[in-house]
Image (cartoon, coloured by chain):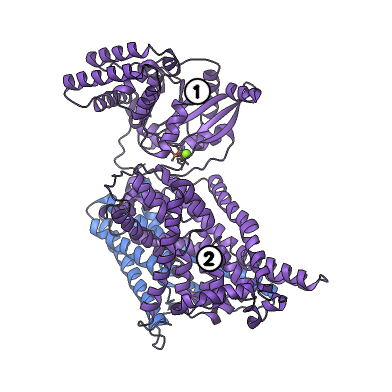
Chain colours: A purple, B blue
Amino acid sequence: MSELSKAKHNRIKIALAGTPNVGKSVIFNNLTGGRAWVGNWPGTTVEKKVGKMRIDRQDAEVIDLPGIYSLTAYSLDELIARNAIIEEKPDVVVNILNASNIERSLYLTISLLEMGANVVVALNMIDIARERGYEIDVRKLRELLGVPVVPTIAIKGVGIDELKEEIKKACRGRKTPELIINYGDEVEREIEKIISVLEKDPALIKKYNKRWLAIKLLEKDEDVIERVRKSQVASMILKQVEKSIKTLEEALGRDIEEYIAEKRYEYAFRISNECVKVVREVPQTPSDIIDFAITHKVFGIPIILSILYMAFKFAFDVATPLVDLIDWFFAAFLYDIVKSSTLPEVVKSFLADGVITGIGSILVFLPNIVFLFIFISLLEDLGYMARAAFIIDKIMHRWGLTGKSIIPLIIGIGCNVPAIIATRAIEDENDRNVTALVNPLVSCSARLPVYLVIAAAFFVAYRGVVVLSMYLLGMLLAIMMALLLRKCVFRGPSTGFIMELPPYMTPLPKNVLIKTWERTKRFLFKAGTVILLATVLVWALSVTGPSGYIGTEALEDPTLLEKSWVGVIGKTMQPLFYPMGWDWRAIAALFFGFMAKEIVVSTMAVLYGAAGEEELPKMLSMAFTPLSAYAYMAFVLIYVPCLATLAALRGELGLKYAILALIYEILLAYLVALAIICIGIPLGLK
Amino acid sequence: MRRSAPLMHIAVCALGAIYLIFASLMLYNWIITVFFPTAKLLYSICGVFIPPDPGSAIVLATTGMLLAGSVYYHYDRYKFISCVLVGSLLGSAILVLQLLTVIANAIDAQILMLYGEIVEYGLKEEIMRPDVLLGIPSAIVLYNSVRELRKQW
Ligand SMILES: Nc1nc2c(ncn2[C@@H]2O[C@H](COP(=O)(O)OP(=O)(O)OP(=O)(O)O)[C@@H](O)[C@H]2O)c(=O)[nH]1
Ligand SMILES: [Mg+2]
């Protein structure tokens, strides 16, 4: 035990800190060979991620952190970053600056240096700075900051070797000189006074830099105050701090916190002024020019719709041959092999009508899902997703909702679980709760098989649009629910939000493939675990009933199937859905779909005895009408968050809210499905 | 250059208008198929098939709006180029997607033969569509506006 903790203690720790979206995760991947998630928008990383790097034949721990602008934390992800730096005291902090916006990045650098951290600066994105016509005097910057500065282009690997070298030097014990900003005579005097009281607690000043501590106390940093409270001389310190603040605010005639921040900004401005030269006047960058039309108040939304539609066209139409190939493999090839084998009847039925039919019915959609993931990853890396968020923010803002909710909602299109975790980037607790609670309404990729099966039965010619309409319905309901929750449950003012639009970038094939693979992996894992188990369960409940074993013929004979357990479940629930006119087998599928929404499809495949992507739609076209099928799709979209999503909600918000989500979604799903039927019939739809 | 500018405006605007017209025709056909199944469809105009596809209609309408709307910003070079660029990008993108779809369908027909299924698919209808035909001038406009933009950097 002690051995282990000692080894842990001795390991060199390197933390990556910087403003959001400067390329920390790319540098992390470069240093460690890891696969941290990289995306062209602020708030991609919301948890710390640890990797390894070799330094002098020793393993060093490299930590990727969420982006921060300063060491004052407002949101959960910022708190994670701040604690990793202040509490865990890494041996080296690699501070990554955005070369195209040094002034904004330097505030954090200054805070780090004041803290006495051992800093190595990576000046990233110099390619973008050049594109904008800036040239940066690296030597000057090095001189002014007093720390090594390495220019890098992380995505191309430029400067990474030099950066590694500098990190190694820093690890070997080269120490950064402490930065002392002169805050003016009055403030300096008070800082001195506070330091002299702090010195009464040697343990405290051994742990933290005393000058930094004094300044933070003057800034009324709550977290630091909490820490100081644990000291034996806490009351003395806090009394002195209170006195100093009072004296200073009287002398300066203003808020001391603001004053100190301003001094730091001034300092940052001075440095950037001295180091950044504008070598070329660039009136407007290509990004700016393109953004005029992309974020236009009239064109913006139609462009989003067009791109979404194209995503679906790409995912559905272009992937067709692969779908058919997989379908052939499961429904014809494997199925026939098993059926024509000499295994006992029960085993044959279990394998063919249960496992192969069930899993096959999901896996045929793998190409569609992969293609959609590719498209989404491309849009993300290109920087379009950030624009989409910006446009929707303009609308949401008018309704009193924060635009920060948008990014988690967009991430939800891939999967709701990471989306709910991404809400950590939202500062305001009410906003965060609401965003997480409405997130399951966003249509994730697990719903796709359901839409595609039903679309293949009824809406072949325009399945792209039908699926698009589901995504829009989900988004719309999410926004409406957010408004409702904000008005009724989580009342309070909403925080403002300024979205920084990152420049457009050519997506890197490697990064797109990694992201697509990571997302696909989750889908495959689900298919091999939850979906497989559920399929086995459904098969078992179909061949048995209250009267015991009824035989595998049940899967071919609907009247016999009604006597099975599944039949009992479906038939019992059927009266509830009387207005929608759904078949009891479809209703039983909803029951099992609670585990994961793909299971709705695999269950239907088993219950309708339809192997393959061709046959199931054929069976469904007899069981539904187009209108009732559309209502069914909407119901599946909304009705319950899947188990994984519920677990994520529980983890982030607590059990109470997870249950709240469960209840409101069931009610909402029922209402929406009913509304679709009630509106559709008078319109002459069937 | 300066003299050709109005001509460019007119050409882009006209292309945008054609996009809008075809978008509304497609939408019209779709509404007919869904709500009035007994009424007659506008199957084709001058050899151009009008699929009842509301999704493509959205893309065509957006492209048309951007191209035609760009003229509204004729006084500002950047704004004008921005609209033309994004509009023609959409127009070209849907062209590429439709061509990919055609190729995919052709491959698919081969795969379906594994089942012994013979599928007929109308190549002509897949290609003589407004999104494909209009995509060609769109791609030319895209090429030109990218070149125009390049000149600056
Ligand atoms: N042009 C250019 N792009 C870069 C460079 N470094 C990173 N990027 C891109 O910048 C974007 C953001 O990179 P990330 O590594 O996700 O940024 P991050 O700092 O981890 O962002 P958060 O986790 O959101 O705080 C990605 O699209 C990268 O491809 C660079 O040197 N040049
Ligand atoms: Mg990151």
Chain of residue at mark 2: A
Q: Can marks 1 and 2 be said to lie on one chain?
A: yes
Closer to the camera in the image, A685 or B36: A685
Q: Is residue A178 visible?
A: yes
User: What is the three-letter code of the residue carrying label 1?
Assistant: Val
Left or right: where A257 falls relative to A331? left
Closer to the camera in the image, B134 or A614: A614
Expressed as whole percent of the image width and height from the top left, the position of residue A519 reads 55, 52
Q: Which residue occupies 40% across, 42% down?
A: A425
Q: Which residue occupies 38% across, 39% down?
A: A75
Q: Is residue A379 above or below residue A468?
A: above
> Of label 1 and label 2, which has the lower sequence position?
1
Residue contact at pointers 1 and 2, CB within 8 angstroms: no
As drawn, the label of residue A316 is 2
Q: Crowding near pointer 2: few (<14 within 10 Å), some, many (20+)?
A: many
The residue singled out by tag 1 in the image is A92
